[in-house]
Image (tube, helix red, strand yellow):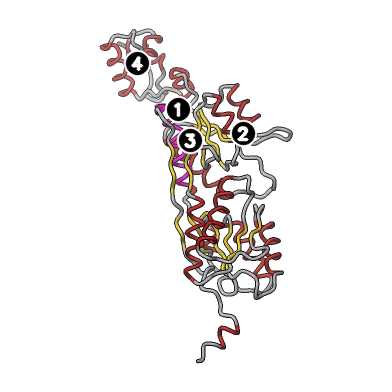
Amino acid sequence: MSKPSSRNEPMTIARLAQHLGLAEGTISRALNNYPDIAEKTRQRVQKAARELGYRPSSSARRLARGVIETIGFVLPTCRTQHSDPFLAEILNGLATELSLHDWDLLVTSVPDGHDEVDVIDRLVGSNKVDGFVIARTRREDARVNYLRQSGVPFVVQGRTDHPDDYSWLDIDNEQAFVEAVTYLRGLGHVKIGCLGGDPTMNFAWQRRSGYLRAMAEQNGHIGVGYLIDGITDELTAFRAAQRLLAITENDRPTALLCVTDAVAIGAMHALTRAGLRVGEDISIMGFDGLPIGRAVQPALTTLHQDSYEIGREAGRMVLDLCTNPPSAPKQTLWQAKLTPRASVNPPAQSPAQQNKGGF
């Protein structure tokens, strides 16, 4: 048995073979537990590899295992140029979890003239990924329909209208908005408006449904113009809130429930521009629990979902699907946490109510 020529040189299969007096092919097969290698030889090779600090290259390891160890994420097509901080947090958590297991995350966007399915199909056809994580699902989602038929492992952050036969991780959006309305009603708000998102997006539809159900069950008042759909960013929220403020003061909502924190912050800017006090003249509540909500003035009441941990959990789920496929889809529903802050308070009394106080 020869000795390695230098401690400074990286240990390779060739050097291991020289050290042990074995063929390189035997070393490679022993390291990858091929059954045609005698147990005594396998143990000898693996013991020497540990002692000498041999680590297989990622490409060699992947070739030996027949996997690519890469998860794909195709950025959803966006109708606006505004960033999505919730999606960025999910990607951060997902990348972190994958890296802990020496897997990679391939993030790609959609070229002009194509859609997400085109890109997913190209990645599947070129064998560049082992699986996918899908986010921001629509009620009827072509990406999910494609992956159902592809045989490629995938996890959905969110759900579609028919989520029974695939793995997903979602927040109970409808129940979260029921709890939000319940909280506002408990403070004394009756006239509660809602800035909703794109109703083709399932999370937005679920939150909208929660608002309507809770307002009906709890005798809330939805005036004309109180529910505005299609609000997707701060700018559209700013304009929608201006429309609400055009309603006669006695008829306008005393509280505003917003589909995301970004939408809530846009509405807050509109109120401030109009000379109104957020949390006093009109209360505002968001959804997501983004860090910026603590920094705005007043601090934003929100329904918190840990988007970073959602990304981590999606990573754990897709790794499990790729390495140890379960017999049935794994489906996880988390609850949002209502986080009260200064942007929501009991409704201000009208001058007539104040006069009835006596004192």
Compare marks 3 and 2 and give the one earlier in the sequence.
Answer: 2
Compare marks 4 and 1 and give the one earlier in the sequence.
Answer: 4
Please tell me whether residue 37 is drawn above or below residue 263 in the rendered image: above
Give the spatial CA distance, label 4 vs label 2.
Answer: 41 Å
Query: How crowded is the residue under tag 1: few (<14 C-alpha within 10 Å), some, or many (20+)?
Result: some
Disc nearest the viewer among 1 and 3 = 3
Question: Disc 4 marks which residue?
Answer: 33
> In the structure shown, which secondary structural element does the residue marked by tag 1 occupy?
helix
> In the structure shown, which secondary structural element does the residue marked by tag 4 occupy?
loop
Left or right for 80, reference 339: right
Q: Which residues are magenta?
A: 308-326
- Please, which residue is most extreme toward the bottom here? 359
Question: Disc 2 marks which residue?
Answer: 142
Compare marks 2 and 1 and give the one earlier in the sequence.
Answer: 2
Compare marks 1 and 3 and give the one earlier in the sequence.
Answer: 3
What amino acid does circle 1 point to? Cys
Give the spatial CA distance, label 4 vs label 1.
Answer: 20 Å
Please tell me whether residue 124 is drawn above or below residue 331 in the rendered image: above
Question: Disc 1 marks which residue?
Answer: 322
- Please name the predominant secondary structure of the magenta segment in the image: helix
* Residue 164 - label: 3
* Quadrant position of residue 44: top left
What amino acid does circle 3 point to? Asp
The x, y position of residue 130, in whole percent, is 51, 26
